Amino acid sequence: MTSPPCPMCDRWQSDADLRIAELEHSYLILNRDQFFPGYCLLFTKQHQTELFLLDKEVRQGLMEEVSRVAQALAACFQPDKLNYELLGNMVPHIHWHLVPRFRSEPLWPRPIWSEPHQELVLSADQYRQRCDQIHRALAEEV
């Protein structure tokens, strides 16, 4: 029995317009729904389902990348809190939802999936500007 194709493995190609950065162990893209400004996905280059299955060096490097991205998002958006979500129940490929959160938003302080919301779709130019903004902040964090 073969496994179904992994949507995360193809995400770097399928969402090329949302690319922010290719890091050593991961890819960073902007989430298409920007209801939460700056919401990004960071996913491993290597298809794996659990952190403990990664080599220790890769795992440590990956956690540094998560921290660098979080720091860049904090610099760009000055959120009240940054959420880090690593679930994998629906897409069993290591990936983080990195979500700047603000006390002023309607879902604060509940999880982003606590109730449905109207997706915020940006123009192609707005996506590019936001990706570039995060990319620049990430480059400054090195």
Image: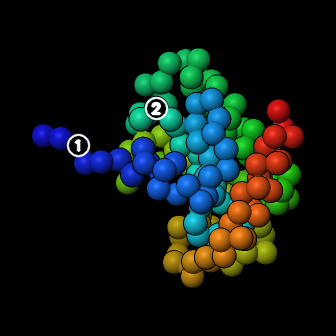
Q: Is residue 82 above or below residue 69?
A: below
- Residue that label 1 marks: 3
Image point (63%, 29%), residue name: 24
Where is residue 78 shown, x and y percent of the image?
85, 59
**Who comes first in sequence, dot 2 or dot 1?**
1
- Residue that label 2 marks: 46
Image point (57%, 82%), residue name: 118
Q: Nearer the viewer, residue 24 or 81?
A: 24
Could you tell me the amino acid type at mark 2? Gln
Image point (72%, 54%), residue name: 82
Where is residue 9 shown, x and y percent of the image?
42, 44
Q: Is residue 66 left or right of residue 55?
A: right
Q: Nearer the viewer, residue 53 or 114?
A: 53
The answer to whether any part of residue 86 appears in the image is no
Q: Is residue 119 above or below residue 13?
A: below
Image point (75%, 62%), residue name: 130
